[in-house]
């Protein structure tokens, strides 16, 4: 595949992280689903196309570092893409294999930062193009800083997601029409005739190139020291952020999975728009306990009276910590939303995010009996709700 084709594919796929995240923000049923693997595959594949062309152009130099870095990044991106394929065919199954593969997402961003610094120092790309790979590499520390300072807020999203679309599109434009210097040529290229005419001993020129190469390596190492360490620190912060032992533990094998009390079509939870006539009275409580100590909770309440239907849909997600000795668990919601539908007064329909004051910690006592999950609010009262295993 030639460079122009690869560059075109890179340009087409560059905005897919933004597109995917916006879609998942709008339709929460798509979050952490097959769709996540779908847009991830396109986005990483587009990134791969750009890196392959950068390697062909030798823009990181012809030394051992310059030749090796693109290959290392290509390998990391391929493994990151394997996690996307895993997510596509087995969404939400966060097995040890998936976790290892998924770690190559942030690692690839760190490697891109290293490559971006190297390309900027070598200077084979000219003008503004020289710094585009570095801008791409700086996205990761920028996004992590925004997450640490702003949390999982809309502001953090709108700072990080559009950055990727712009930076990766610029990278694709660079590989489509590279503006290359004629000095730093790949190994094996023909040197301009005027260089051969310079009346200077070959040994002196060789020594000068060696001195220049050592100086360039020192300069690259200095840049890396100041740029890579913050990126690794933010990666460490992200890793510690993902699992909080104070509020999170692995779900017991017999409890992990989806459980439902009542009846409702969960596949329609997010797509429902208030038009379904339904039964006179509907209630459902659903828990989805992830193996990694995260959970989702769905509550549906509906009343149909004199032809008018009032419905309330509540959704929370967050972290759950189990005490297997006590047979209890404590849920700590981190986000949620409410939706209300009034068939006879549709102007009062609403959808809003849960306020911080509404994200309340709750403790439940449980018992698994006959393949059913019994829930209650006390050690001697575990049978308030009887949930059956569910799937959707």
Image: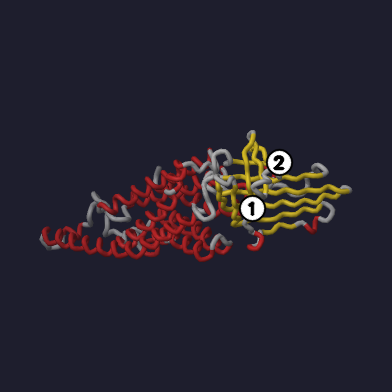
Residue 317 in sight in this render: yes
Residue closest to the far top: 370
Sequence-first disc among 1 and 2: 2
Residue 322 in the image: above or below residue 203? above
Tag 1–tag 2 contact (CB < 8 Å): no
| Residue 203, quarter of picture | bottom left
Q: Position of residue 215 (x, y in %)?
A: 22, 64
Which of the two marks, 1 or 2, is nearer to us in this view? 1
Q: Residue at x 36, y 61 (%)?
A: 229
- Viewed as shown, does residue 228 lie left or right of 20? left
In this picture the colour scheme is secondary structure
Q: Is residue 130 left or right of residue 379?
A: left
- The quadrant of the picture occupied by the N terminus is top left
Evaluate whether residue 267 shows in this view.
Answer: no
Question: Closest to the observer: 1 or 227?
Answer: 227
Q: Secondary structure at mark 1?
A: strand
Residue 143 position, x and y percent, is: 48, 61
Q: Secondary structure at mark 2?
A: loop
Which residue: 77% across, 56% down? 349
According to the picture, the residue beneath numbered tag 2 turns out to be 265
Give the camera-side residue of 75 and 167.
Answer: 75
**Quick one: which residue is furthest to the front in this view?**
380
Characterize the local packing of mark 2: few (<14), some (14-19) or many (20 or more) Cα atoms within 10 angstroms.
Answer: few
Q: Quadrant of the C terminus?
A: top right
The residue tagged 1 is 316
């Amino acid at each position: 595949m030639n460079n122009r084709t690869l560059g075109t594919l890179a340009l087409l796929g560059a905005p897919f992280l933004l597109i995917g995240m916006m879609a998942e923000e709008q339709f929460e049923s798509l979050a952490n689903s097959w769709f996540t693997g779908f847009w991830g595959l396109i986005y990483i594949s587009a990134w791969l196309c750009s890196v392959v062309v950068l390697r062909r152009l030798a823009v990181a130099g012809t030394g051992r570092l310059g030749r090796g870095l693109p290959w290392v990044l290509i390998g990391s991106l391929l493994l990151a893409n394997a996690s996307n394929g895993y997510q596509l065919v087995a969404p939400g199954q966060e097995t040890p294999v998936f976790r290892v593969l998924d770690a190559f997402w942030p690692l690839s961003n760190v490697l891109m930062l290293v490559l971006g610094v190297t390309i900027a120092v070598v200077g084979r790309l000219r003008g503004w193009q020289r710094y585009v790979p570095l801008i791409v590499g700086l996205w990761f520390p920028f996004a992590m800083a925004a997450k640490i300072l702003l949390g999982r807020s809309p502001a953090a999203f709108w700072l990080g997601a559009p950055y990727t679309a712009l930076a990766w599109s610029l990278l694709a434009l660079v590989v489509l029409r590279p503006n290359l210097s004629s000095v730093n040529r790949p190994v094996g290229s023909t040197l301009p005739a005027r260089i051969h005419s310079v009346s200077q001993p070959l040994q002196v020129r060789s020594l000068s190139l060696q001195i220049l190469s050592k100086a360039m390596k020192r300069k690259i190492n200095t840049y890396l020291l100041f740029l890579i360490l913050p990126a690794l620190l933010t990666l460490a912060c992200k890793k510690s952020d993902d699992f909080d032992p104070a509020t999170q533990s692995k779900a017991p094998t017999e409890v992990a999975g989806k459980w439902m009390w009542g009846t409702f079509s969960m596949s329609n939870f997010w797509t429902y728009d208030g038009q379904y006539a339904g039964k006179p009275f509907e209630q459902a409580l659903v828990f989805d306990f992830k193996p990694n100590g995260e959970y989702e909770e769905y509550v549906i309440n509906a009343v149909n009276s004199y032809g008018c239907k009032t419905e309330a849909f509540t959704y929370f997600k967050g972290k759950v910590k189990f005490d297997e000795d006590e047979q209890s668990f404590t849920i700590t919601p981190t986000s949620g939303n409410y939706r209300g539908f009034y068939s006879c007064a549709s102007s009062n329909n609403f959808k809003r995010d849960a306020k911080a004051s509404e994200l309340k910690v709750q403790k439940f006592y449980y018992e698994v009996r006959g393949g059913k999950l019994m829930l209650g609010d006390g050690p001697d009262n575990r049978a308030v709700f009887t949930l059956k295993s569910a799937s959707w």
